[in-house]
Image (spheres, helix red, strand yellow):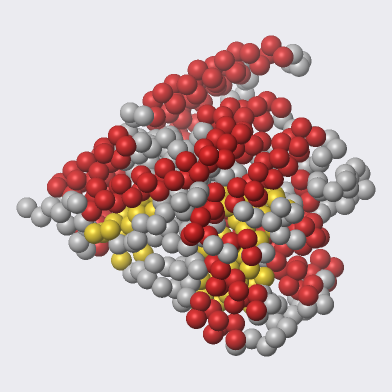
Amino acid sequence: MSFRGDSYDRALTRATEHARTWLDSVAERPVGPRATASELLAGFGGPLPAAPLPPEDVVDLLATLAEPGLMAMQSGRFYGWVIGGTLPAALAADWLVSAWDQNAASRYATPATAAAEEAAAAWLLELLGLPAGADVGFVTGAMMANFTCLAAARGAVLSRAGWDVGRDGLSESPRIRVLVGAERHETIDLALRYLALGSPQPVAADEQGRVRVDALSEALDAFDSGTPLIVCLQAGNVHSGAFDPLEAAIEVAHQHGAWVHIDGAFGLWAAAAPSLRHLTTGLAGADSWTTDAHKTLNVPYDCGIAIVADPVAMRSTFGAHASYLIADDSGPGDPMEKVPEFSRRARGVPVWAALRSLGRSGVADLVEGLVRNAQALAEGIAAINGVQVVNEVVYTQVCLRFGDDARTRAVTAHLIADGTVWMSGSRWRDQDVLRISVSNWSTDSADVARSVDAVRRAVDATAAP
Ligand SMILES: *Cc1c(COP(=O)(O)O)cnc(C)c1O
């Protein structure tokens, strides 16, 4: 095989056709997959065939094998976990990223993707009201963004204590104390584990899952001054959507010299919407922030964003300065100085495309629309007999309860089997709940109405005879 542009034609044409077929099917197909991974493996697997297969046939085979096992996460009636859909501009940009095949590590070698990502980063900081000089790294998701920010935090708080973790490691370093809200996302714990910081100390939360500032203050008072401290706050609780009282919590944490990190995987976007911005008051005062673009911003997987106010903290943690790399030290820094990866795809380019497509008003409309739909769902479902909305619906999340745990699980199972919607079951505050996350740009009032009907059917079908 030799490289010729037209050798891609048939495979790309087939891929476009399959993509269109899939996207056209999303609105009406059952939301859930119809086959399990183990069932699908029979088709995908077996011994690796000895002979090659033409690229277009590989594409056909892949699309056919995958179809029954695809979850319609782009459906306007998919409300599981916190999962965004895909804006058209972002999806198309993502295809180009693959076609261009740039290794997005350096400004010198791949200036186009570096520039697009830098522009996207500046837009993000402006939209979210964060300090203009902050470093922005495009990583795979909020898990890795939490890891990236907390790695920078670890280096910075140890440096203030006179310890160089890059040179001397952690084994004999001063001990870092990490305080987290009782309802932080578990990826905070995972990130801390990967960073060898152990389990964090939880601080009590209120009935919506917001950290209590009095409890935080009390916990911080217990440490000697000079103790390296990190406090992790949350903008957007996965169950209630609630925001920690950021302004007061940041103030208390900073009084104790702590680094403040905010996990705003989906909640940070409230700062980009005038009617929701009050939820994030004080946000800009933190030291680092996590968010996802593949959730609220609706770019394709995978795309998380790590933001660190102090570029020195970021780049001294991640900057690689191997002699064969040609560094660009003209100011913004190389992409690879802001992420744990060395080589990576230009995943910030779909972010640029999404933001350019929406504009400032479009981002605000997107986020406000999600919240309006969440509130409409909560209202419609609350009117059904025997249903309780258990959270204050301030953002995109709704938690429902149907009498007791068993009934709540039965309704959840019925809904998933019905296929009109996808909502995930969970446990929150020691009881089973059905969780709704409205994170898809394409959800409209017709989806909301059909979703409320689906819940009503499930409630009727699971009623005691
Ligand atoms: C989804 C989520 C994460 C993890 O994000 P990934 O993109 O799945 O890595 C972390 N924190 C919160 C609050 C989340 O909602």
Instruction: State left or right for residue 320 relative to residue 157.
Output: right
Q: Nearer the viewer, residue 386 or 254?
A: 254
Q: Nearer the viewer, residue 47 or 71?
A: 71
Q: Position of residue 393 (x, y in %)?
A: 36, 57
| Identity of the residue furthest to the left in this view | 465
Q: Is residue 322 above or below residue 240?
A: above
Q: Which of the image's four quarters has the N terminus?
A: top right
Q: Residue furthest right?
A: 323
Expressed as whole percent of the image width and height from the top left, the position of residue 207 reads 37, 71
Q: Could you say which is closer to the camera, residue 27 or residue 365?
A: 365
Whether residue 276 is visible, yes or no, is yes
Give the residue drawn at x 53%, y 78%. Answer: 216
Q: Residue at x 64, y 65 (%)?
A: 285
Count up the numbered dots.
0
- Identify whether 132 is placed above or below 62: below
Q: Residue at x 73, y 72 (%)?
A: 157
> Residue 241 occupies which quadrant of the picture?
bottom left
Q: Is residue 60 left or right of residue 403?
A: right
Res. 417 in view: no
Q: Position of residue 201 (x, y in %)?
A: 55, 77
